[in-house]
Image: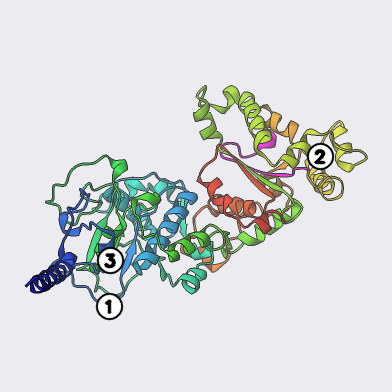
Amino acid sequence: MPRATRLLSYLGVVAGLSILLLTLPYVRQTSPSSFLPSSLQYTTPQEQEQPAKPRPGHIISSAEKYFSWFPHGDFAEQHEAFRNAIRIAYDTNRTLIAPQLRLGKPYDWLPFHDLARRYEAQDKTFLRSLCSSAAQLTEESWRTELEPCATINDFTEVPWSSVFDLKPLQTQFGIRIIERVHGHGWGENESALLSSNIRESVIIVDPMTFPTNGSEIDPNAEPAEAPPLKRYLRAPQLKELDGFGYIQFGALSSAGRIRTRNTAGQSALHRALTRSVFVTPQPTIPGLSAVAKQIMHALGGLGRYSSLHLNLAQFMALDGRSDRLEDNGQELMDAVVLEVFGDIPINQAVAAAMPILQPSRLAEIMNGPQQDRRQLLDACVEYRREVDSRYPVYYLVNDLVLDPKARPDIFGPLMQFFPCVFTRRDMADWHIIDSHWPTDDPFYDRDPDADYNTLLTPLLDMTLATRAYSFFEIPQTMLTRFMSWQPKPIRLA
């Protein structure tokens, strides 16, 4: 009898465990609050790997899927947005549709619909038509309110592939990229796609704009409100969007808003994006590389000069004493000199603080009654090459004064401590480069009236910075972060 009892007990335990094992996969935990409607929420890491459940009317298929975003900000912010798009493309296996790089006056972050209109307003085909019309009071006149006719030539757009080599993203990571080089249509009206198959499968996602999750998936949903800085899209929620053929994001320059899975592939991609891929400009814009090489050669060659960027408007705003450079320019530049001395490579700081060695051509010019700055350039390059390889030769960029040497009342302190400071204006004055940008290539026919002499200067300055021995920026911006990724062999050449 006891043996029979034990047998029954054993069978009961086995049956209980079998039932538990069969039912456990269907047991769900309570879902935490989220900014997605409940139909798009995930709760556990295990669920992240499961296929997304399609919403009614959006059937998952094996067809190619796409996504895009709206750019804003300066070069560094647009570059950061593209980097985040690359990360999303790798995680979702979607084709990335890239808007072009805007050159000219940047515009700030805006909520989704405002940012969309801001982007659409950049379409110069519409703008030229409106601006050439005597009567501009049409349904499209909102475009000229955002991009006035008077400043239509003060901005342009260029493909990212004309600045960076995008091929390694495809060959090394399988990331597919389509550049939107014609038109500014997005979503259902995507300019880069000929097919209209996606028109019934488009979703808008923007965590910073829509408190539902970041999207307009369910306009009737009433999720719990959360502070804007707490709004983001989690990796499982991003996976839930697999049922849509096209995702239109808002701004992507804030990495934490769209979170991707932490995988070995993502780690490898991150390393590449901070070392070798989409890092160092390799411009194919006609004339840009040639002008950069001419200036680089005049400054001594690859890695023989340093790049100094002064964001004076921002510096004055942080200083707070005046918004006019003329009011306290010398005091401001004294502060700049102290920052430069404190943060440049120690070998350069020591060399700059030491007396110029004699005999040398540089010492003769510095001790002479008058200085010929063209001769000074050659003397500085010669001194660094033959006398003291640590001595700093600077390529100066600033945002307020076109010709710093003409304003000794402001730039005097800087040039007193660092006499070998030269600018693009110097190179043009000395006919090292042409004073006007060469625009006879068909590349420029797409926007023939744009002021390329001004618009391409930031790309030129950035290209020169990546070829420099060191880079220093006051105050620091996202460009400093971008420069920190540049390959060391180039910068230390």
Give the residue furthest to the left: 1
- Circle 2 sits on which residue? 372
Magenta residue check for 276: no
The reply, left or right, for residue 375 in relation to residue 30 is right
Q: Is residue 330 visible?
A: yes
Q: Check residue 405 for magenta coloring.
A: yes
**How much space separates mark 2 and mark 3, taking CA atoms?**
61 Å
Is 23 on the left-hand or right-hand side of 397?
left
Residue 432 spot, x, y in % from top left = 73, 53
Above/below status of 126 relative to 62: above
The label nearer to you, 2 versus 1, is 1
Q: Sequence-wise, which precedes: disc 2 or disc 3?
A: 3
Kindly state the secondary structure of the residue where label 2 is placed. loop
Query: In front: mark 1 or mark 3?
Result: 1
Q: What element carries label 3?
A: strand
Circle 3: residue type: Tyr
Nearer-the-camera pick, 93 or 177: 93
Drawn side of residue 155 relative to residue 250, left or right: right
Start-end of magenta stretch = 391-406
Pick whichever, 478 or 158, lies toward us: 478
Label 3 belongs to which residue?
A: 246
Q: Mark 1 points at which residue?
A: 62
Amino acid at pointer 2: Asp
* Amino acid type at image mark 1: Ser
Q: Identify the residue at the far right of this view.
A: 359
Q: Residues within 10 Å of mark 2 (few under 14, many from 20)?
A: few
